[in-house]
Amino acid sequence: MIDLRSDTLTQPTDAMRAAMASAEVGDDVYGEDPTVLALQERVAGLFGHEAALFMPTGSMSNVLAVRSLVQPGQEVLCESSAHIARAELGAHGAYSGITMRTWTHPLGHVDLDAVRHLHVPDMGPFFVRTAAVSVENTHNFAGGTVLPLDLLRDLREWTTGVGATVHLDGARIWNAHVATGTPLADYGATADVMSVCLSKGLGAPVGSLLVGSADTVAEARVWRKRMGGGMRQVGILAAAGLHALDHHVERLADDHAHARLLAEACGVDPASVETNIVVVRRPDAASYVERAAAAGVRVATVGPTTVRLVTHLGVGRADAETAARVLAGLGGPVS
Ligand SMILES: *Cc1c(COP(=O)(O)O)cnc(C)c1O
């Protein structure tokens, strides 16, 4: 089976497992795990922020990142198909008492006019105050699209001017970096607090980091423990993350090339594929998924007429070519 359902399906490589097995560890709730400390320092430095905090999941990282910017009873603005709005099961409301309003953009981009229109300053007891704007780069449900850096800069400048903040969900910021050559620190400079994942295309089995100021990270550390996310000898997982940063960032370019190959086979314009995600519109999505699986390629629906293919570390060139042949054989949509 060639599995293109998600880039979370990667298996740790032998070299990654060896790095994990030999990791120096300590009790991270005591702040004494040297491998975790090394990972946190490295990731903070990559994005030009003061500090970072190792988290079990990207969702928990987003929840704590957003709550560091938004008080209970305040709101965060985001794109309507953002992961924080659709895929975190209402956590920002359920845990943090935060509400959301959204704008919609077909590519998941920032719509600065919409943000200006939605934004509400502090109006005392009359309206919900907008405390933050959240952006997702790359944008998962829009199809792995990259947010233009100049838009992110404009957003940060505008929000700062009105006393609001920016959260960046950078689960796949590595893909944006490799696709565009934009330095990670340039992305880091457009956000007050951000979250990045090691468990997607980077191929680590577990782990995300919250990245921000030293104060934000100190407070997030308290909330992480409060929510049951204090971890002990977790350097064994941080070692996988360090290994991924050393060996699995530049190779994301291969995943992007494989995604374009698959797009072509599925009748999608390869030029529209910016990173490792291909969205295929199929009125027959459910049966398409079944027929692909019967032919040895697993893909997933993300809507009744939408199929998503995601390339990753576990899909080499030969697999990508085989999958392209299989999917091309399934033909155009029956409408
Ligand atoms: C995967 C993902 C996350 C975090 O997901 P977890 O499964 O909780 O680690 C956050 N944002 C985006 C855009 C994602 O794709």
Image (cartoon, helix red, strand yellow):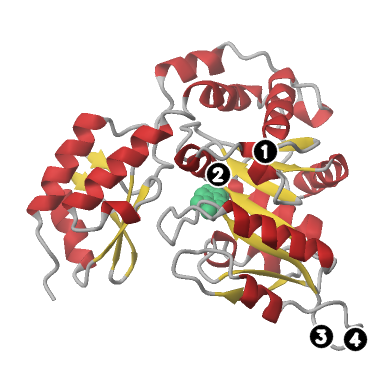
Task: Read off the residue under disc 2.
Answer: 173
Question: Which residue is label 1 attached to?
Answer: 185
- Residue bearing the label numbered 4: 125
> In 3D space, how far apart are the residues under numbered discs 4 and 1 (Cα atoms)?
39 Å
* In the image: residue 318, left or right of residue 188: left
Residue on which disc 3 sits: 127
Marks 4 and 1: which is nearer the front? Answer: 1
For residue 305, say whether it is visible: yes
Give residue 258's quadrant in the image: top left
Q: Residues within 10 Å of mark 1 (few under 14, many from 20)?
A: some
Write the residue at 62% across / 38% down. Answer: 184
Residue type, label 4? Pro
- For image coordinates 73% across by 37% down, the residue present is 53
Viewer-nearest of labels 3 and 2?
A: 2
Mark 1 residue type: Ala
Amino acid beneath label 2: Ile
Q: CA distance from mark 3 to mark 1?
A: 35 Å
SS at badge 4: loop
Q: Among all residues in the image, which is located at the extreme right? A: 124
